[in-house]
């Protein structure tokens, strides 16, 4: 299941994806430009899943910087979701 949790500006808002693994925790990814200049995803909350309240707090902080941002939440209890673009770490 996936849902648009927050709609931002269709032309200027940053995109964040929250993967909710439920008992394992959540991961937040931010759309970025990769090292090769193509689209990529940044592990915004680090390498390991965090508690959902921490993922939500991170997104709330980002909203203070960019009121145009988009948030999509994907429920992934079996940890099977894979991005088409590369995932990079900070």
Image (spheres, helix red, strand yellow):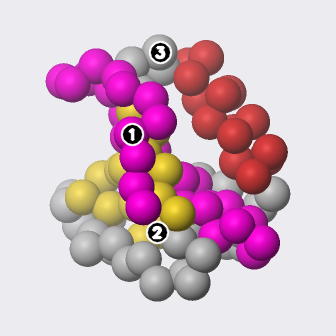
Q: Position of residue 27 (x, y in %)?
A: 62, 61
Q: Is residue 73 magenta?
A: no
Mark found first going from the N terminus, 3 or 1: 1
State the mark number for residue 88.
2
Disc 3 vs disc 1: which is toward the camera? 1
Cα distance between the residues tagged 2 and 3? 24 Å
Label 1 belongs to which residue?
A: 4
Residue at 54% in and 53% down: 18
Please tell me how crowded label 3 is: few (under 14), some (14-19), or many (20+) other residues with Cα within 10 Å.
some
Left or right, 32 with reference to 10: right
The magenta segment: 1-28
Q: Is residue 21 magenta?
A: yes
Cα distance between the residues tagged 2 and 1? 23 Å
Cα distance between the residues tagged 3 and 1? 15 Å
Disc 2 vs disc 3: which is toward the camera? 3
Left or right, 64 with reference to 82: right
Label 3 belongs to which residue?
A: 67
Please tell me how crowded label 1 is: few (under 14), some (14-19), or many (20+) other residues with Cα within 10 Å.
few
Left or right, 68 with reference to 53: left
Mark found first going from the N terminus, 2 or 3: 3
As rendered, which of 29 and 39 lies closer to the eye?
A: 29
Q: Position of residue 15 (x, y in %)?
A: 38, 40
């Amino acid at each position: 299941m996936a849902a648009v949790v927050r709609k931002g500006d269709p032309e200027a808002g940053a995109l964040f994806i929250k993967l909710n693994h439920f008992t394992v925790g959540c991961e937040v990814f931010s759309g970025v430009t990769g090292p090769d200049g193509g689209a990529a995803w940044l592990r915004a909350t680090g390498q390991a899943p965090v508690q959902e309240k921490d993922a939500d707090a991170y997104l709330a902080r980002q909203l203070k910087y960019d009121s145009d941002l988009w948030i999509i939440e994907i429920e992934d209890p079996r940890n099977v979701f894979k991005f088409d673009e590369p995932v990079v770490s900070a």
